Amino acid sequence: MKTIVLSTLNAKYIHTSLALRYLKAFSQHDFPGIQIAEYTIKDPAMNIVSDIYQRKPDVVGFSCYIWNIEETIVVVSMLKKIMPELIVVLGGPEVSYDTEYWMNRLPQVNFIVVGEGEETLHHLLTELEGDRALYSVFGLAYRNKEGRVVINPPRPKLALDDIPTPHRFAEDVPSLANRVVYFETSRGCPFSCQFCLSSIEVGVRYFDLERTKSDLLYLIRSGAKLIKFVDRTFNIKRDYAMEMFEFLIQNHSGCVFQFEITADIMRPEVLDYLAENAPPGIFRFEIGVQSTNDLTNSLVKRRQNFAKLTRTVTKVKESGKIDQHLDLIAGLPEEDYNSFRKTFNDVFALGPEELQLGFLKMLRGTGMRHDAEKYGYLYMDHAPYEILGNKILPFSDLVRIKRVEDVLEKYWNAHRMDHTVRYLIEREFTSAFDFFQEFGDYWEERGWQKIGHQLEDLFTRLHAFLKHRGTAKLDVIEGLMKLDYFLNHKYKPRKIWWDFTLDKPRQSDYLRLLAEQPESVSVSFAALGIGEKELHKHVMIEKLPFRLDRYLQSGELDRTSEQLLIVYFPPDASAKPQPFTLALEPTSA
């Protein structure tokens, strides 16, 4: 075999496949013709097939996941029509379970590598060049001479240090700065969550620590900007996690590192160390909360102490050093609409920088899929196997929660209106969930889910919703929305979504005042030394019907005087806009 192409369809271009690099690293010594070919699920199938065809492979392997399996099947079908002698191998978590189903569904596929694939693929390639004793390849599914599907016994787990590093390919270096680098220091998970494939593998195995450090240093020095650790629970071993955190703090060089952590087992001394020593912004934590319903967690065998989790998330947030991404899953057993509303509000109250609302997927091989009938689950026949309802959470409720997800992404996770959304949740709506739900329902009633949106559309649509429901103190909310709108721009915006309260002569008067008496705003504003000409180029002003400075400092809503909002947009686009305020004459409001 001269040419072997290892391929996958990533969800996005910025993603990279760690699996392909492991496979190549393990086999390239004996099979130097191995190439990696990555595409995305958005690429036209014809383009993918054309590219692979031009490489003239003898063997092509695809790494398969729930997000790419159906698109991969299309590509494989086309390849086998134009290259009928091509040997097609599938691997990855999506085809490692119900393997006989996949072999029967996909007659154009020659082999499926089940489970951990490095050694199995190497053994398969060796047999294809030699005696073709396929029965000897543990972890392989194939068809015998009679066409019957044969699934060999599973392969024993590899000693991880026998796998060569996947991070030293010269061809990867030019793109390191522009793509996500995936990295693992361990394999396996200590927990048994029934909705997750990681629960199937018992025990945790670690790569050699010095090798791990060496690879990380190589990636950092080669220009990597974002390294995402794929360990299922990075902090399961306190000493190991502490040593890694210390190493990364000492050697980060501006690179950002993202980890999946289990928050309720994070030790206080680790949190104290991070609060004191971690540079702001280099670490991101992803924390799977999933549900705060105790019965639900017990049914899916998920051990979780929410009080300890809250302690960890709160302490990390108070440090101001680390962004936190918290995950929820709607549709778990015995979690109906009202229970999920409570879960959402419990977790939103922790103030995560990002709250991801996902929906239960019945993954092949998991306990949840095995118990689907027990809870009355309906779910999609094909990937991603997302649920369509169960005995206590009908499809109608799932659809409503999806509206929450849509608005949550646009108005919280994107951080376009932090001041406005916080005010609305704290003062105008019963809870965070109720704000996102009511707005999501209104959004769909207007058909906005069918059309695109620009930044100003998000503001005008929220304003229309608030006006429609008769929201109190709308002028105050409008003031916060104006602040948020300005802060979303790197340069002075050319258009706004409201009518200025100041006419041009009045604006000019205020700008002249700011140029002549900058100290009347603040010492820090005066220190900017902005002349009147530059004020016209780089400053936006607007009159507000309340004391914004007091509200931002203490939450006090003081309407006894108006205030001038002043936003300076630095000429350097990498700098953030700076808001200032100037008290105006008292009003009768």
Image (cartoon, rainbow, N blue to C red):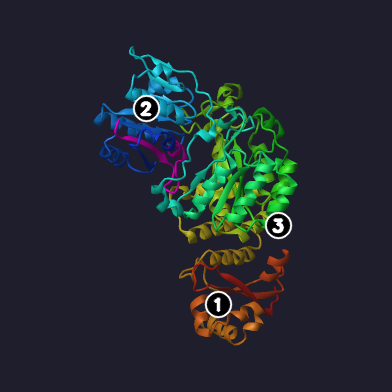
Tell which of 76 and 155 is nearer to you. 155
- Toward the top, the furthest residue is 146
State how far apart marks 2 and 1 are (Cα).
74 Å
What's drawn in magenta, residue-wise?
Answer: 1-22
Tell which of 194 and 406 is nearer to you. 194
- What SS does tag 1 mark? loop
Q: Is residue 93 left or right of residue 51?
A: right
Disc 3: which residue = 276
Judge depth for marks 1 and 3 and give the one in front: 3
Q: Amino acid under label 3?
A: Glu
Disc 1: which residue = 502
Disc 2: which residue = 125
Residue 461 x/y as whole percent: 52, 57
Residue 281 x/y as whole percent: 60, 57
Q: Amino acid under label 1?
A: Leu
The correct choice, above or below, for 87 with respect to 441 in the image is: above
Earlier residue among tags 3 and 2: 2
Residue at horizontal 26 percent and vertical 40 percent from the top: 54
For disc 1, the neighbor class at 10 Å (few under 14, some 14 to 19, many from 20) is few
- What SS does tag 3 mark? helix
